[in-house]
């Protein structure tokens, strides 16, 4: 297990990603039910596209030299150093209701979001 890295990060951004208890339970459920390699981490990222300009990406991936490693709710999360600017302070929840099911991103850096909640602008 790698140690949490905080090189060149301010105190405020040492752990910029937060998973709620519900989101962490869902991630563990996915890990337990899918053949995810042990050397893969939960990657939180942004990519161009979506109604508002940027969209969120959540998946499992190998760690690269460009990644920072964080831990939240006992889940190891990797984020590309270039994406921390857009993701610092984000909270990821999981909704499992009749009207919606899936991960929900609460990003304090978003200046606008689309109706579906999966894209934003900053």
Image: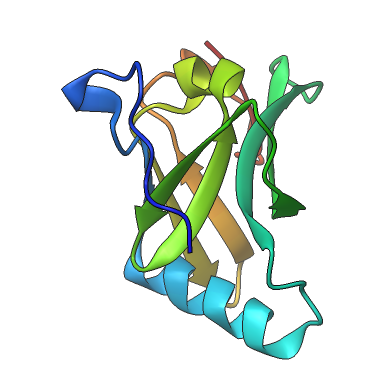
- Residue 9, horizontal then vertical, whole percent: 32, 20
How many labels were placed on the picture?
A: 0
Report whether 55 appears left or right of 69.
Answer: right
Compared to residue 8, the image places residue 19 above or below, namely below
Compared to residue 40, the image places residue 105 above or below, namely above
- Residue 77, horizontal then vertical, whole percent: 51, 51
Judge by depth and name the residue closer to the eye, 31 or 9. Answer: 9
* Res 45 quadrant in image: top right
Whether residue 107 is visible to the viewer of this picture, yes or no, is yes
- Residue 17, horizontal then vertical, whole percent: 40, 42
Query: Which residue is depicted at the point 35% across and 24% down?
Result: 7
Residue furthest toward the bottom? Answer: 33
Report whether 3 appears left or right of 1.
Answer: left
Query: Which residue is depicted at the point 38% across and 54% down?
Result: 71
Render colour scheme = rainbow
Query: Which residue is depicted at the point 33% across and 66% down?
Result: 73
Residue furthest toward the left? Answer: 11
Judge by depth and name the residue closer to the eye, 43 or 104. Answer: 43
- Residue 49, horizontal then vertical, whole percent: 81, 21
Compared to residue 28, the image places residue 7 above or below, namely above
Whether residue 19 is visible to the viewer of this picture, yes or no, is no
Judge by depth and name the residue closer to the eye, 115 or 8. Answer: 8
Report whether 7 appears left or right of 61.
Answer: left
Query: Which residue is depicted at the point 67% across and 28% down?
Result: 46
* Res 117 quadrant in image: top right
Judge by depth and name the residue closer to the eye, 78 or 90. Answer: 78
């Amino acid at each position: 297990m790698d140690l949490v890295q905080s090189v060149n990060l301010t105190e405020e951004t040492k752990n910029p990603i937060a998973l709620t208890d519900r989101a962490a339970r869902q991630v563990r459920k996915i890990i337990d039910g899918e053949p995810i390699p042990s050397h893969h981490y939960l990657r939180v990222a942004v990519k161009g596209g979506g109604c508002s300009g940027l969209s969120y990406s959540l998946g499992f991936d190998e760690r690269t030299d460009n990644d920072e490693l964080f831990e939240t709710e006992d889940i190891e999360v990797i984020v590309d150093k270039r994406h921390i600017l857009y993701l610092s302070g984000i909270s990821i929840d999981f909704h499992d209701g009749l009207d919606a099911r899936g991960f929900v991103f609460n990003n304090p850096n978003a200046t606008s979001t689309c109706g579906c909640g999966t894209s934003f602008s900053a």
